[in-house]
Image (cartoon, rainbow, N blue to C red):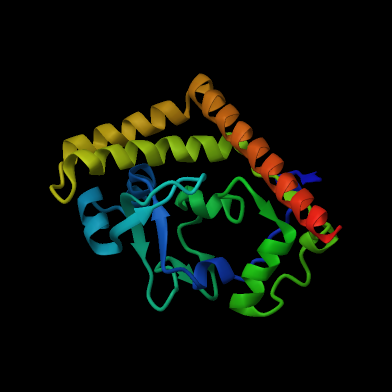
Amino acid sequence: MQIDIREYQCNRCGACCKHQDGIIISLNDAHLLARRLRMPLKNFVRKYCREAGVFDVFGHGPFRGLAIRTKKGVCPFYSGREGCTVNEAKPAVCRLYPFNTIHVTRASLLKMQRKKDGDCYDSCYIFSIPDEGVIGPDYEALAAHWIRMETTREYYRLYGDRWQEDQAQKAIASGARLSGDPKSVGLYARQLRAAFDELDRMNEGVLLELFADKE
């Protein structure tokens, strides 16, 4: 059973903003946040970011990338009273959460949240989804995000700690251009769907083996 992403409702508990070791972002995300805060990109990266090991949606990695530094797990742009203070420029992973992987089930999501915050999802729509139900991500948004992450990864592969403002801006432009191109997003989205289908087949095979063992 696959549930459309639009059927998930956030209850604005702030759990996803308060329990993070780091928030993985692309250079494009950093650019949008720096512009929102009216500061140069280089200054934003130095003040708010750290190097991070990034995994793609299929679990490959780690690759070199960026993450927003958190303090005791709390995002620097989160306010208990206001919520996200940079909402209009928030990173893609925040917009996609919890659908920033290709295989999320209701049971796995609830287990993750209960481990961190108790039963913080009691009032959410997710409780009407069966335990084994797969919560379907927005493939187009997920594909666009990972195109940007790939351009970021390529930048760090080439330049590492040697910050090159011009090259960083080129990477940002490249990621934005590719993720806005219906052909490139469509192609990557099809790849994500194929991987998702493969995961389903693999999981079905594992379940069949378990039942066979019981027999």
57 on left or right of 41: right
Q: Quadrant of residue 77?
A: bottom left
Q: The C terminus is located in which quarter? A: bottom right
168 on left or right of 109: left
**Identity of the residue furthest to the top in this view:** 183
Residue 138 seen in the current view: no
Vertical order, 62 against 185 (above or below): below
**Identity of the residue furthest to the left in this view:** 162
Residue 160, x across and y down, in percent: 18, 47
Q: Residue at x 73, y 45 (%)?
A: 205
Name the residue nearer the viewer: 133 or 142: 133
Residue 175, x across and y down, in percent: 38, 33
Residue 16 seen in the current view: yes
Name the residue nearer the viewer: 101 or 128: 101
Residue 162, x across and y down, in percent: 13, 47
Q: Residue at x 64, y 37 (%)?
A: 198
Name the residue nearer the viewer: 189 or 164: 189
Picture mark count: 0
Q: Residue at x 59, y 36 (%)?
A: 195
Q: Residue at x 61, y 37 (%)?
A: 139
Residue 71, x across and y down, in percent: 37, 75
Q: The N terminus is located in which quarter? A: top right
Q: Quadrant of residue 116?
A: bottom right
Name the residue nearer the viewer: 51 or 212: 212
194 on left or right of 149: right
